[in-house]
Image (cartoon, rainbow, N blue to C red):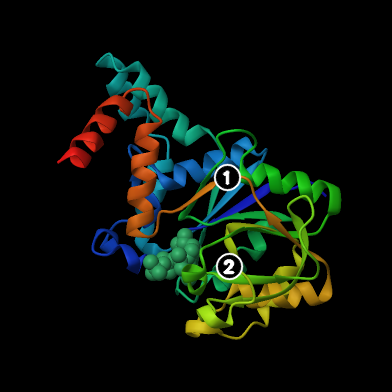
Amino acid sequence: MQVKKAVIPAAGLGTRFLPATKALAKEMLPIVDIPTLQYQIKEAVDAGIEEVILIISDAKKDIIEHFKRNEAYENYLISNGKQKEAEAIKQIATMAKISYVYQHEMKGLGHAILCCKEAVGNEPFVIILGDDLIINAHGDNVSKQMIDIYNIYHNSIIGCQNVALENVNKYGIMSLKAPMENRIALLKDMVEKPDIDKAPSRLACLGRYLLTPEIFDILKDAKPGKGGEIQLTDAIKVLAKRQDVIVYDFIGRRYDVGDKYGYVEATIDFALKRDDMKEKVLNHLKEILLK
Ligand code: UTP
């Protein structure tokens, strides 16, 4: 079965980014001038996804506003000679078929995914975490890479990369059935945010999943795990006992833009890649370094 749907969970509270996220969705914080979520949706579209399901909360209406067409504003921009800007805001609303699912209580990522059961139906789907930005400047984006692997093996896939040992306690960490071959291995077990001395590896789950619909039956019966939340990690562990789950070491640079430092990193790197900003930003950085 083809992978046609992507789910983007964006209902979390974003406590790591307070106070900015008191009334603003962290997924809407811009990297220079494009909200993170817009990059995520573009990733899905570029990977061939036909429908994007956004998980939001009642507090995140700014997301709906951003992706809704606003013809009055487009016309205003056109009548003021700003065709390029008009086209840019039109494109936001027309680039994908977007539907919304509400998560009314923040009970964790596993619970957020369960909220999409009806919207996804009985098909495989990609999950793109709303605050993990992954850029592959030299080829297919990470969602496309994972869909290509799915089309060969038809198993669930967890996107991962090695992280520094001091950071393993921030992620779901995996152990493998056998060493990686061609960036692929089978998942043996997974532990959510392990203590540094208890981590089975440095292989961390970094914000991309491609799951078969069996995950919903597992999530339905899932009990709260670490932090009192329903953890997607716990459900994936159960899935791996029932069927093969692939761990894929994806190609791309990942930014945790839900973290203040990751956000600054992404902002600098993205600005340095833009022709209209590169020189000025570089000069500014040089000035700072020479002080
Ligand atoms: P995070 O754990 O990074 O989001 O979840 P959070 O809870 O907002 O983070 P902090 O620690 O309080 O800053 C990863 C993604 O899953 C979504 C978040 O919006 C984020 O994009 N999420 C998380 C949900 O949609 N619902 C939840 O209950 C939890």
Specify whether 193 is left or right of 26: right
Tell me the residue at 31%/29% (across/down): 73
SS for callout 1: loop
Q: Residues within 10 Å of mark 2 (few under 14, many from 20)?
A: many
The residue closer to the viewer here, 77 or 202, is 202
Residue 46 vs residue 171, the one in the foreground: 171
Q: Is the C terminus in the top left, top right, bottom left or bottom right quadrant?
A: top left
Residue situated furthest front in the rendering:
290
Instruction: Name which quarter of the figure residue 273 lies in.
Output: top left
Q: Position of residue 62 (x, y in %)?
A: 35, 51
Measured as percent of width and height from the top left, residue 95 is found at: 53, 34
Above or below for 260 versus 85? below
Q: Residues within 10 Å of mark 1 (few under 14, many from 20)?
A: some
In terms of depth relative to the viewer, which is nearer, 80 or 168? 168
User: What SS does tag 2 mark?
Assistant: loop
At x 27%, y 60%, the residue is 23
| Residue at mark 2 to residue at mark 1: CA–CA distance | 29 Å
In the rendered image, which residue does mark 1 sit on? Answer: 252
Q: Earlier in the sequence, mark 2 or mark 1?
A: 2
List the single residue furthest toward the left: 291
**Mark 1 residue CB less than 8 A from any atom of ligand 1:** no
Expressed as whole percent of the image width and height from the top left, the position of residue 135 reads 53, 42
Q: Which residue is mark 2?
A: 115
Q: Quadrant of residue 48?
A: top right
